[in-house]
């Protein structure tokens, strides 16, 4: 049995390995003339620290698979409404035609979907057969409660898994997100996303300000470019409680520290935590009025209207910025790897998955939907839509998939560059929602002018017993 790495050991060994995004292949995909795409380096992104190596899954070889096996049956699917959820929803009719399985589809904004999902799972009788969820918020909870089905038996069954599904095509990071500590594979990885910086090049050029390379550069640029009289703000980012912890935890990595480490030590009152929270507070001084109520979608809207010089958020939310139907900044955005912090340059890493409810009475057709939603073609479509970095290696070696990407070259460069410095954004704990709620309130208070050290001390005291109880 292989030795399980601690979070710190894992990060030290894997930080430089990337996520499966081959820089060379991406650059070739954006070249003006069609040129052969060279094979990429192996996809070896930093994996979820507590995951063990996935159980080996034999590749199906028997030609006994039939997409029409469950024709006439019905499933209910619950998706988060985001870039990839939109892609899956868009092509669901294609799945129905392929299989004869009818689908009741629900797409719900994440702030509503996440608590709704937990309530339904806790009821013991969720309304859905298939659920899309965020690993960084619910992996530990779902795994601990065994709310989603172990799919290893299905993967090993050639009558259930299409011969071309190619489980081994998933990257190291993807497999790690999918796998629980006891070896169960209880979901399919849909995407891996990184926190990165988006800049309005037109606003920067107007005042001859260079694009930021460090945290200090970000703050200086925000101050210089902030001009509310012209409806231009130096920075925009999540200020809404709970959602805002994403930005703070990404920034905290710049001090080379996790909010909660692998031994469950809370680092939320440390000098690094206070410094990063103070930095967040200072950036938000140059945000639009009402930013304490902004999630990613409100931030996205402000930036798309050309009203903010900088926006820091997940790479998967960038696609609408290049859509002329909804954006005024098409062709004006610089996509950058997260700037270097005072001690280190890290790109916060999150991920999403899709699984089968363990109480579903329609597990067979639900499994068909999950494997369809994460097959090579659907992964290529999601990548082309700018839904983030994909966990399948083949996306980065398929010339057709790369050629279909409509995002600008520097977006692709940011995907590749982020992979080299990827590190999990949130602590992998069961009460991550409570963590985000409690520290989110503290961060919202800071936007209003509260002292960061005082707020973090209070939040830490409030959360510590919750963490201890959850891990007892």
Image: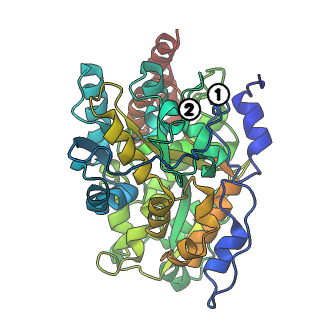
Work out whether mark 2 precedes mark 1 in sequence or the reverse, and give the earlier one. 1
Residue lying at the far bottom in this picture: please name it: 33
Query: Percent x, y for residue 325?
Result: 29, 79
Left or right placement of residue 169 versus residue 436 in this view = right
- Residue 159 in the image: above or below residue 377: above
As rendered, which of 67 and 3 lies closer to the eye? 67
Residue lying at the far front in this picture: please name it: 63
Q: Which residue is mark 1?
A: 261
Q: Are marks 2 and 1 in contact (CB under 8 Å)?
A: yes
- Residue 292 in the image: above or below residue 208: above
3D distance between C-alphas at marks 2 and 1? 7 Å
Residue depicted at x 35% and y 51%: 295
Q: Which residue is mark 2?
A: 427
Query: Percent x, y for residue 217?
Result: 64, 64
Residue 129 picture quarter: top left
Query: Percent x, y for residue 269?
Result: 59, 27
Q: SS at mark 1?
A: loop
Q: Which part of the image, by quadrant, shows the N terminus?
A: top right
Residue depicted at x 64% and y 27%: 261
- Residue 61 in the image: above or below residue 355: below
């Amino acid at each position: 049995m292989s030795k399980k790495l601690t979070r710190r050991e894992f990060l030290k060994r894997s930080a430089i390995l990337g996520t499966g995004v081959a820089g060379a292949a991406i650059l070739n995909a954006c070249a003006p003339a069609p040129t052969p795409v060279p094979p990429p380096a192996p996809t070896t992104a930093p994996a979820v620290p507590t995951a063990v190596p996935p159980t080996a899954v034999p590749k199906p070889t028997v030609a006994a698979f039939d997409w029409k096996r469950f024709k006439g049956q019905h499933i209910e699917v619950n998706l988060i409404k985001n870039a990839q959820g939109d892609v899956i929803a868009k092509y669901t009719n294609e799945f129905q035609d392929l299989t004869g399985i009818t689908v009741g589809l629900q797409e719900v904004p994440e702030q509503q979907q996440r608590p709704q999902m937990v309530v339904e799972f806790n009821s013991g009788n969720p309304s859905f057969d298939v659920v899309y969820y965020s690993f960084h918020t619910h992996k530990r909870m779902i795994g601990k409660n065994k709310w989603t089905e172990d799919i290893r038996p299905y993967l090993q069954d050639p009558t259930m898994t299409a011969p071309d599904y190619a489980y081994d095509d998933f990257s190291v990071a993807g497999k790690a997100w999918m796998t629980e500590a006891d070896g169960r594979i209880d979901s399919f990885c849909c995407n891996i996303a990184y926190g990165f910086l988006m800049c309005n090049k037109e606003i920067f050029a107007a005042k001859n300000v260079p694009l930021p390379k460090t945290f200090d550069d970000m703050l200086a640029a925000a101050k210089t470019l902030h001009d509310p009289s012209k409806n231009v703000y130096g920075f925009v980012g999540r200020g809404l409680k709970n959602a805002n912890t994403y930005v703070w935890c990404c920034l905290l990595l710049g001090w080379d520290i996790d909010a909660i480490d692998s031994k469950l030590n809370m680092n939320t009152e440390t000098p690094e935590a206070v410094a990063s929270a103070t930095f967040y507070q200072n950036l938000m001084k140059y945000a639009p009025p009402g930013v304490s109520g902004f999630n990613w979608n409100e931030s996205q809207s402000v930036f798309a209207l050309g009203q903010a010089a900088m926006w820091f958020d997940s790479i998967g939310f960038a696609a609408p910025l290049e859509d002329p139907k909804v954006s005024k900044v098409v062709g004006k955005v610089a996509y950058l790897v997260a700037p270097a912090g005072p001690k280190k340059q890290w790109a916060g890493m999150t991920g999403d998955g899709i699984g089968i409810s363990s109480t579903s009475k329609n597990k067979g057709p639900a499994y068909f939907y999950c494997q369809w939603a994460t097959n090579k073609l659907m992964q290529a479509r999601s990548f082309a839509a700018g839904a983030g970095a994909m966990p399948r290696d083949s996306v980065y070696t398929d010339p057709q998939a790369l050629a279909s990407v409509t995002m600008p070259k520097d977006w692709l460069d940011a995907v590749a560059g982020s992979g080299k410095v990827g590190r999990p954004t949130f602590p992998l704990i069961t009460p991550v929602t409570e963590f985000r709620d409690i520290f989110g309130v503290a961060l919202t208070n800071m936007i209003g002018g509260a002292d960061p050290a005082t707020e973090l001390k209070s939040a830490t005291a409030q959360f510590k017993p919750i963490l201890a109880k959850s891990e007892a």
